[in-house]
Amino acid sequence: MPTLLHHFITQAAKKYPTDNALIFKDQAINYQQLYEQLISISNAFIQLGINRSERIATYLPKRIETVVSMFSASAAGASFVPVNPILKADQVTYILNDCNVRLLITTSDRLKQLQTILGNCADLHTVIILDSPKQIHSDELSHIKLLQWQNIQSEHTSLPDIANIDTDIAAILYTSGSTGKPKGVVLSHYNMVAGAKSVAGYLKNTRHDRILAVLPFSFDYGLSQLTTAFSVGASVTLMDYLFPRDVIKAVSKYQITGLAAVPPLWIQLAQLQWPEETMQTLRYFTNSGGALPVEVLSSLRQALPDTSPYLMYGLTEAFRSTYVPPENLNSHQDSIGIAIPNAEVLVLREDGSECADNEPGELVHRGSLVSMGYWNAPEKTQQHFKPFTSPLTGKILPEYAVWSGDTVRRDKDGFLYFISRKDDMIKTSGYRVSPNEVEEVVYQSNLIKEAVALGIKHPVLGQAVVLVVIPGEKTFATKELLAYCKKNLPNFMHPAEIIVKNTLERNQNGKIDRKLLAQEFQTLFLNKDSQA
């Protein structure tokens, strides 16, 4: 039985060596070929001086080498850090420094964007690029060994003999917190193997499934497409789409059986025509990263009458928490569901006691999917990961549960319903965005005196980022600030609207009253023809 993440590949290579594991455009590799690459690259990592538990980062779009790199890090006894490919240079550098990345795998174009600031990454000793160097100034990377992917292949015939166990760190996924910089959520092999088995179980995945991966691997929901597929020997088609219609074309071309997306993409897909062949092959689709509007779900079910919908809720700190079984969808389509297999999800009061039916409380997740906490952030870890006191016995159990920060209620049938967030996090396009992270960049523009970032309800994005500012100069122009934001923030953090005010509402303590401001603009997008 698999205990470490890369064991999924070794197991599938033994059982189904000639079955396709990965498809990228017109390139396909089977499980035996993937296993051979796993052997080659994991040994190469060790030859490059990577030691057990050190971090290897990928700053890449979805392609076969991206997948090989992550699972080879596991086989080398290291931990992988998938960096969202749409992040800007300062954000990438923060992540590399925060978890002391030793080896980075990227492309020459991306390295060019990073080269002037990689000198600040004292722990980084090697960069591997997938293509040929282009306009790379080696003097700016004097402390870093620069190699090409094609030149690091090793000739080993077996995986490295590393004494890792399932409670060792497999990956660190960065997600925004309610304040400040993003936090690295630490996932063990145990977390990821258990999560893959649980999700593959309720999705009824088999080796015959063909899953389309359109979400970034830095997103736990996107990474789950790989782990669930590999756990049963299914194949994964890798795709970075430009337009929603490209997703439907890929479903047809590759005869996809499973598709995962977030609400903004589903909203656009629901407006398009689904060809007959997609109805014949697509067995299920899943949603997470926010609530799917009822009318959108209805449109998708009409377009795909033989496809089973799975509505899911998760948090990176526990990988996945709840789902609505398709047979319960008609009666509970506005619910976030019940606990996934091998997890317990409770609704608790602040004192840790269990809420009654329909009483609001905080969603608390316990079980094998609860992550190891936040990297290098003990105070934040203590806020969200706490020893679990059983509501049944009152005894403290030898485990930690994660307090989600989400207020929910549970109905008499055990189904959960989302009510609100306890903090000011913005949930947009499936991403969690910290208002402080947006505001920090805005202040660096030197164009404003004060700024506050809000999450305002949006018909496509779930919430849109709205920036309310007090200008620093009389000649202030919103287009100049917007251009600065687009240059220095990834697209999911771009403000959909910039509102200029002379004063910002404050509470009795003199702090900006975010909730009052949000109420002022809560109907901002309701009557607009908004685009994702």
Image (cartoon, rainbow, N blue to C red):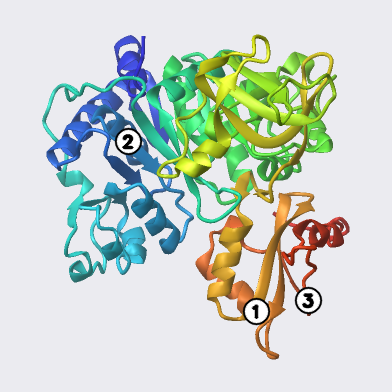
N-term mark: 1 or 3: 1
Label annotation for residue 438:
none
Position of 10 with respect to 83 (left or right) is left
Instruction: Name above or below for residue 375 compared with residue 164.
Output: below
Position of 319 with respect to 423 (left or right) is left
The quarter of the displayed image where residue 321 is located: top right
Q: Residues within 10 Å of mark 3 (few under 14, many from 20)?
A: few
Q: Where is residue 293 in the image (x, y as percent from the top left)?
A: 79, 38
Which residue is label 1 attached to?
449
Q: Where is residue 342 in the image (x, y as percent from the top left)?
A: 56, 13
User: Which residue is pictured at 59% across the width and 74% down the height?
Assistant: 483
Q: Where is residue 88 in the image (x, y as percent from the top left)?
A: 46, 61
Which residue is label 2 attached to?
79
Amino acid on which the number 1 mark rests in the picture: Lys
Q: Do the residues labelled 2 and 1 touch (CB within 8 Å)?
A: no
User: Which residue is pictured at 17% across the width and 61% down the height?
Assistant: 143
